[in-house]
Amino acid sequence: MRLVDTHAHVNFNAFKDDGDEVIKRSLEVGVGMILVGSEARTSKRAIDYANRYEHGVWAAVGLHPTHLFAARVKGDDYSFVTRGEEFDSEVYGKLADFSKVVAIGEVGLDYYHLDEFDVTPDEIKDKQKQVLSQQLILAAKRELPVILHCRDAHNDLLPLLQDFRRQYRQLLPVSRPWGVVHCFSGNESLANEYFAIGLLISFNGLITFSHDWDYLIKKLPADKFLVETDCPYLTPAPFRGQRNEPGLVSLTAERIGQLKGWSLERIADITTDNARNLFNIDW
Ligand SMILES: [Zn+2]
């Protein structure tokens, strides 16, 4: 059985002592992975890791919305220092040239952390939208899919993506999806809006300990979703409280199988196909 963890951060500091061991452990159980960058440094590190493996490890490069301004951010099960990085399309364009880079991400909008910065919320939102648009254009020009992050911002993200698609339609693939909304937080009607513009959605360990998405998952068409861990965060049950890792993505796939009445093997086949199709990877 093969699975792809389509959103892993083994390139983050939480794995600085044993990243390669974690990757090998995951590959041994048939789990390939896309290592997702959040700023220039972690994007480069994602490529460094991917370059060390012949098969099964790929990279995504991008500037996450929370890294546009410097701050110390605290969440429920994480805290980090944000970089205050200025988006440089030349830097990210060069990173995107590496053959192991299969997506631009993670990019998007995050209005959850607006209070942590010394700038007004409107200033932050405007900057996030501007940098997201620049990265969407970079992805389209490189014919790379996008990995989208959205927290408390769907009201702005959806129309921005709809406008983008209208404007850049000739650069986007016709018969394939062009991106994924990772860690999907919305309901069925919102999911359908994203499907309508050619995007997929992705689930992680959250769905193993929250029932908020049970109804949506039961109704989801087979070709519209991916699985991910978002490790080191969002560890699935029954391992909550421990550091998450790509190998645990099977628990999320299993939970989706339970909800849909499908076997784990079937979920693995479907989601791996969907990942191959979106990221053009061989796994
Ligand atoms: Zn992430």
Image (cartoon, rainbow, N blue to C red):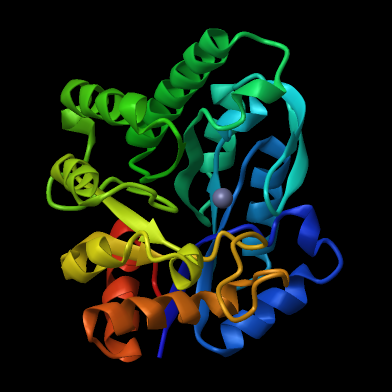
Classify residue 256 by image quadrant: bottom left
Q: Is residue 21 left or right of residue 2?
A: right
Q: Residue at x 35, y 64 (%)?
A: 226
Of the 4 image quadrants, the one containing the C terminus is bottom left
Residue shown at the point (56%, 30%) measured from the top left: 65
The answer to whether residue 238 is above or below residue 166 is below
Q: Position of residue 41 (x, y in %)?
A: 73, 40
Apparent side of residue 90 relative to residue 168 in the rendered image (left or right): right
Q: Looking at the image, which residue sits at the far right?
A: 17
Q: Residue at x 39, y 36 (%)?
A: 139
> Above or below — where is 20 with respect to 278?
below
Q: How many discs appear?
A: 0
Locate the N terminus and report the quarter of the image it occupies: bottom left
Which is nearer the eye, 191 or 145? Answer: 191
Query: Outermost residue toward the front?
Result: 211
- In depth, the one of 157 and 102 nearer the eye is 157
Can you see residue 84? no
Q: Where is residue 125 shown, x and y percent of the image?
A: 50, 17
Q: Which residue is pictured at 49% across the width and 36% down the height?
A: 107
> Is residue 97 visible to the viewer in this orientation of the structure?
yes
Classify residue 120 by image quadrant: top right
**Residue 166: x, y in percent?**
16, 24
Q: Position of residue 98 (x, y in %)?
A: 55, 48
